Image (cartoon, grey):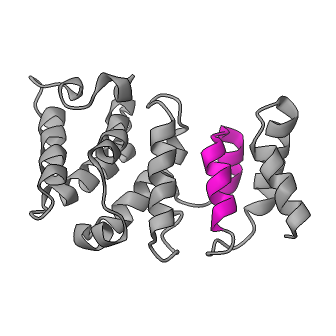
Amino acid sequence: MGLSGFKLVESMLSSHTPEAESAVIAFAGYFSSHTLNSETSSIFQKIIKYNNPAAIDELLKNRTPESFFSTLEPSRSLILFALTTLSEYRFNELYKPAILVCLGILQNIYNNPEYGHKLYSLSIADIYHSAKYLKVENEKIEQLIISFLENLNNLSRMNNISTTSGNILDAHYDNSKKLESIIPLSILS
C-alpha cells in the first residue's frame, strides 16, 4: 500500500461518521485476506483499536481472537497496543473479540513473565486496566485474565506486580471481597 493509500486508511480510522464506519468495515473485509506479519500488523491493530464490531468481525473471520497475533514475534509495540487498547475503553465499551485479541497478546507474551518483563515492564495501572475486564463476565475473557494474573503472581523479583496480581485474584475468588477494593473506581467505571 502506497503512502496515499495509507493516508486514506488513517483518515477513515480517525473518524466515526457513518461513512467512515462503512468504509472501515469494507476495508477490514478486504484487508482480512492479507497475511498478518510485521509489515501489516499496525493496520490490523488500528482496525481492532477502532472498535467497530462489524469491522473486527470481518478482520477476525475464521480466526481465533486470543491467538490472532501469536504468529508475530513478541515485541514491546505489540504489548503497548494491547495495553493502550485495554486502557482506552471502559470495561463495557470494548467489543469482546477485541478484548480477547488484547488479552491473548498479554497471555502469550507473559506466559513466561520474566521474558515479558524484559520486553516491557508492566505498571500497576497496566494490571488494573487488564483486570477490569473481569467485570465483563465472559468465560474466555476470565480465563485469559486469570492465567495472565497467575503468571504475574508467580514473579518473585517484581514484588508490586506480583502482590497486585495476587490481590486481584484473591478478590476475584473470594466472595467476601470485591474488585472495587483493589482496582480504583476511576478505572472500573
Observer-nearest of 65 and 84: 84
Residue 61 visible, this orientation? no
Give the quadrant of residue 139.
top left
| Residue at point 25%, 55% (across, down) | 147
Q: Quadrant of the C terminus?
A: top left
| Residue at point 11%, 38% (across, down) | 170
Coordinates of residue 10 in the picture (x, y in percent): 78, 51
Q: Against 83, is 37 above or below?
A: below
Observer-nearest of 158 and 174: 158
Lateral position of residue 167 relative to residue 56, left or right? left
Coordinates of residue 34 in the picture (x, y in percent): 74, 70
Q: Quadrant of the N terminus?
A: bottom right
Q: Against 152, is 135 above or below?
A: above
Lateral position of residue 19 relative to residue 96, left or right? right
Q: Does the magenta stretch include residue 56?
A: yes
Lateral position of residue 28 relative to residue 98, left or right? right
Give, as a single range, the part of the protein colored magenta: 41-61
Q: Does the magenta stretch include residue 154?
A: no
| Residue at point 36%, 67% (across, down) | 109
Give the quadrant of residue 16.
top right
Coordinates of residue 181 in the picture (x, y in percent): 18, 25
Q: Against 176, is 71 above or below?
A: below
Lateral position of residue 179 relative to residue 18, left or right? left
Coordinates of residue 186 in the picture (x, y in percent): 36, 24
| Residue at point 53%, 36% (across, down) | 94
